[in-house]
Image (cartoon, rainbow, N blue to C red):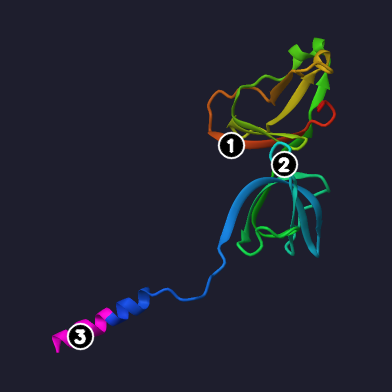
Amino acid sequence: MRKALWLALMAVVLIGCSKDDVDYPTAHRFVELLTVLKNDAQGMELEKVGLNDSESVLLITDQHVDAQLERGRRVIAEYSVSDTDVSSRPMPVRLHQMGLITFDTIRVVANDKMADLADARMTVVSVWRTGMYMNLQAKVKFDGEKRSFAVVADETTLGSPIVECYLCNVGSDVGVTVIDRHAYGSFFMGDIWTM
């Protein structure tokens, strides 16, 4: 009796561990900065601009966001794509989260105005280029007051092999930090970029 019970238990364990022949698609999750191309009741089209000069990928979804997102707006989004769709063009995706980020064009400032720019401290965590965008992640000391940041170029360096750009954190230094907030920014540099 004991042997029969043990054999029955082993059979259940072995059957439960056997591989079935069904390949289930695996969802790949990404968190990336994307460009909004379309947002209406039929869904969204988003552009994943390639790293450096890599090709861009069009992402499509039947989901949409109620917020008014104009064409060309940069956002941070978490999305997933299945194994079967990962090489499809356009690529169908499922959106999980989306948020606005600081989005602007690199501004050109006269050299004599550079000293007047906001210089509240912030820590740059990473900087990378996707196409004609310079992207960054930074830690900003946040105390509840509205803050923003921008990238400006010194006009005297335009046309030179290296254009000097400065990150400006608008707002005064905080006395007591409530939190170090991670912020993302994406800045169009097409007006100053020379290939």
Q: Is residue 63 above or below residue 51?
A: below
| Point 49% across, 76% down: residue | 21
The mark found on residue 182 in the picture is 1
Question: Which quarter of the rendering shows the N terminus?
Answer: bottom left
**Residue type (three-letter) at the residue carrying disc 3:** Leu
Percent of width and height locating residue 42: 80, 65
| Front of the two marks 1 and 3 | 3
| Front of the two marks 2 and 1 | 2
| Point 29% across, 82% down: residue | 11
Question: Considering the numbered disc 2 on the image, is that residue within a helix, a strand or a loop?
Answer: loop
Disc 2 to disc 1, how far (Cα)? 26 Å
Image quadrant assignment for residue 82: bottom right
The mark found on residue 34 in the picture is none
Residue 77 shown left or right of residue 177 in the figure: right
Which one is earlier in the sequence, the residue at label 3 or at label 2?
Answer: 3
Residue 103 shown left or right of residue 24 in the figure: right
Residue labelled with disc 2: 54
Q: Is residue 169 above or below residue 67?
A: above
| Point 16% across, 85% down: residue | 3
**Residue type (three-letter) at the residue carrying disc 1:** His
Which one is earlier in the sequence, the residue at label 1 or at label 3?
Answer: 3
Q: Is residue 137 magenta?
A: no
In contact (CB < 8 Å): disc 1 and disc 3: no
Question: Considering the numbered disc 1 on the image, is that residue within a helix, a strand or a loop?
Answer: strand
Percent of width and height locating residue 106: 79, 28
Magenta-colored span: 1-10
Question: Considering the numbered disc 3 on the image, is that residue within a helix, a strand or a loop?
Answer: helix
Image quadrant assignment for residue 111: top right
Residue labelled with disc 3: 5
- Disc 3 crowd rating (10 Å Cα; few below 14, some 14-19, many 20+) is few
Disc 1 to disc 3, how far (Cα)? 58 Å
